Amino acid sequence: MLAGKTILLGVSGGIAAYKSVELVRLLKKEGADVYVIMTEHATKFVTPLTFESLSGNPVFTDVVGEYKKYPVEHIVLSEKADLMVVAPATANVIAKFANGIADDYLSTTNLALTCPRLICPAMNHNMYAHPATQANLKRLDSYDNYQLMEPKEGRLATGIVGKGRMPEAIEIFNEIKYLLSPKDMLGKTVLITAGPTREHYDPIRFLSNPSTGKMGYAIARKAAERGARVILVSGPVSIELPPKVKVVSVNTAIEMREAAIKYFDETDIFIGTAAVADYRPKNRAAEKIKKGADTLILDLEKNPDIIAELGQNKDQRIVVGFAAETNNGFSYALEKIKKKNLDFIVLNDVAQKGAGFGVDTNIVKFVFPDGTHEEFPLMLKEDVATKILDQIMKL
Ligand code: C5P
């Protein structure tokens, strides 16, 4: 999603500079064109060659001669840039930016920029707490186009625990993606169910399925990037939580239904990606069932159909369902749209390679109430998520 974007990465002289190496790698992987600008002190922590090799672009430093090699590059770069991220931003750089000082490559470029900047302060906790630093940060925050990322509490380079740690590269990367996404879903609340449910028949055993939550989590992440308020009701999964998303953890279908109903009133768009168990054991033994008889018969009863219930009460809301089928998918999907009162259904043929549970890709078809459909090739779940949200915004 960062293809075609030019990102400047300003690195100043702090030990956290090593984390920015990983940040360049993440940005490049996502297709961004990255130019690194280092202060002279930064070059003592990480060599320009490291950033040059990873970014594939020349690195701009304060070393004498650089200006000669690329005389007006700081102006050219500032015109090209979509965003400048400064990580780590030392107290010194923050002070310069806040006061309009332009005495090196980084601070000069900063003054010439008109694009947004993301400033990631990282320093000793006393330096961070100093009233001068706090006043400078406040001043920066009051300028247009400056976004600050709070440093974290934790063990600092000196071994002392305090506030001043730079966020991890992945967190900065997520913030960059958020800042660069068009905010076409601003003001919308999206409720998503994801993952499997667990239906216990004794305290330690349950019926479940191999859903990993990847599809629902990808939709949650993308919707949040596009500015939506996202509530993710999630069964037990072990994947990374998407940033800027409210996660409500549940276990059983009954708990998932309760949580979904609780937030449905405030919802504009409901997307049911969860692989909800259709049946649950009628009885849950209070103690572990001992191994004994050759056969064990479990009595099952039907779980509530969450999306069908919400679909019946949808009013102006958009309700989108998923269908994982191994045969006759299309006719089942059409039947489900009617029965559950959905706006469309995302059908995946889980029998195909690269589709369905556990994998990072999916092969889907959107099926609409009038019987029409749109087919997509094998795509990353992230891209499927984008297509789903695009379709919803069209509706
Ligand atoms: O009927 P089926 O389980 O195939 O329907 C799949 C769709 O319905 C998915 O969107 C799933 O999240 C949702 N669903 C639900 N509650 C159930 C079963 C399925 O919300 N009990």
Image (tube, helix red, strand yellow):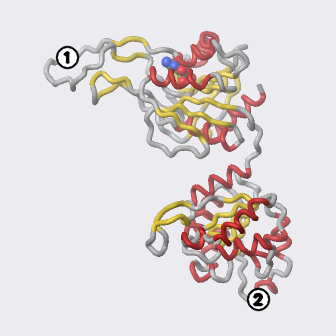
Indicate yes or no: mark 2 CB to ligand 1 under 8 Å: no
Q: Residue at (30%, 15%) from the top-left corner? A: 283
Q: Is residue 121 visible?
A: yes
Q: Name the element at disc 2.
A: loop
Q: Residue 188: where, in percent of width, then height?
A: 72, 32
Q: Badge 2 is on which residue? A: 65
Q: Residue 288: where, in percent of width, then height?
A: 21, 26
Left or right of residue 132, residue 218 in this image: left
* Residue 22 to residue 219: above or below: below
Q: Residue at (57%, 44%) from the top-left corner? A: 242
Q: Badge 1 is on which residue? A: 295
Q: Is residue 323 visible?
A: no
Name the residue type under label 2: Gly
Query: Observer-nearest residue: 45 or 390?
Result: 45
Q: Residue 144: where, in percent of width, then height?
A: 81, 58
- Picture disc at residue 63: none
Q: Residues within 10 Å of mark 1 (few under 14, many from 20)?
A: few
- Whichever of labels 2 and 1 marks the residue nearer the N terminus, that label is 2
Indicate yes or no: mark 1 CB to ligand 1 under 8 Å: no
The quadrant of the rendering that contains the C terminus is top right
Name the residue type under label 1: Thr
Q: Residue 190: where, in percent of width, then height?
A: 65, 31
Left or right of residue 25, residue 237 in this image: left
Q: Identify the residue at the far left of this view.
A: 292
